[in-house]
Image (cartoon, helix red, strand yellow):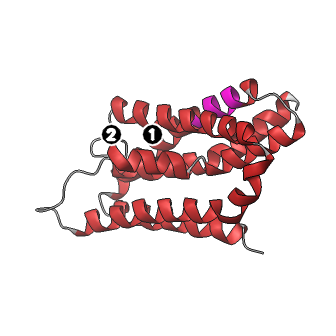
Amino acid sequence: MGWLSLLALAFALAMDAFTVAIVAGLSAHPLTGRHVFRLSFHFGLFQALMPTLGWAAGTAVSRYLSAFGHWVAFALLALVGTRMIVEASRGPSTRRASDPTSGWSLVLLSIATSIDALAVGISLGLLGSGIAVPAVVIGVVAAGMTVVGMVLGRQVGTIWGERVEVAGGVILIAIGVQIVATHMP
């Protein structure tokens, strides 16, 4: 795989992470460097590990993943999106500060945004390609796009206020629906 193809692949895989990072930037109150580091590190790490796992798994697992991987991504994004909507709907007096960069939200978002990378890893394994360089490039691009997305999300959140967290939850659910829709026959 050439460098241009590899970069195009890495940017394509990072789009989900970028979009989710915008939503995370909207809902982190206040957005700190620690939030940005945690999310970008984990998204980059998972984006690098998933193709490596897929590459190692090979063809035996590919037919099973292709059948339901998109449903797993949808379920994870819908769970986190619904949680964001519920948290935003609690009202200011009972609402806890939302932090999508910690706990189960961080783990679920990291997995959900990197499932496509698992399938790419399986494809690279079938092609007989190496995995070290692609995994590193995919991870670094995802981490960088996550930083940009979070900063962009914070700017939008500052302009529109806290109501955007509900919209963020809806966006995560919509991303999940879009993933399922693109994998339907």
Instruction: Tell which residue pokes out farthest to the left in this image.
Output: 93
**Position of residue 150 in the picture relative to residue 88 (left or right):** right
**Position of residue 163 in the picture relative to residue 22 (left or right):** left
Q: Amino acid at mark 2?
A: Leu
Q: Position of residue 38 (x, y in %)?
A: 41, 33
**Residue visible at 69% across and 30% down in the picture:** 135
Instruction: Tell which residue pokes out farthest to the bottom in this image.
Output: 185
**Residue visible at 78% across and 40% down in the picture:** 8
Q: CA distance from mark 1 to mark 2?
A: 8 Å
Tag 2 or tag 1, which sits nearer the N-term?
A: 2
Q: Is residue 137 rendered magenta in the image?
A: yes
Question: Does 20 sit above or below residue 132?
Answer: below
Question: Does 98 sit above or below residue 121?
Answer: below
> What segment is highlighted magenta in the picture?
135-142
Q: Position of residue 4 (x, y in %)?
A: 84, 32
Q: Label 2 belongs to which residue?
A: 31
Binning the other alpha carbons within 10 Å of mark 2 as few (below 14), some (14 to 19) or many (20 upward) gives some
Q: Label 1 belongs to which residue?
A: 151
Q: Amino acid at mark 1?
A: Val
**Residue visible at 77% across and 50% down in the picture:** 60
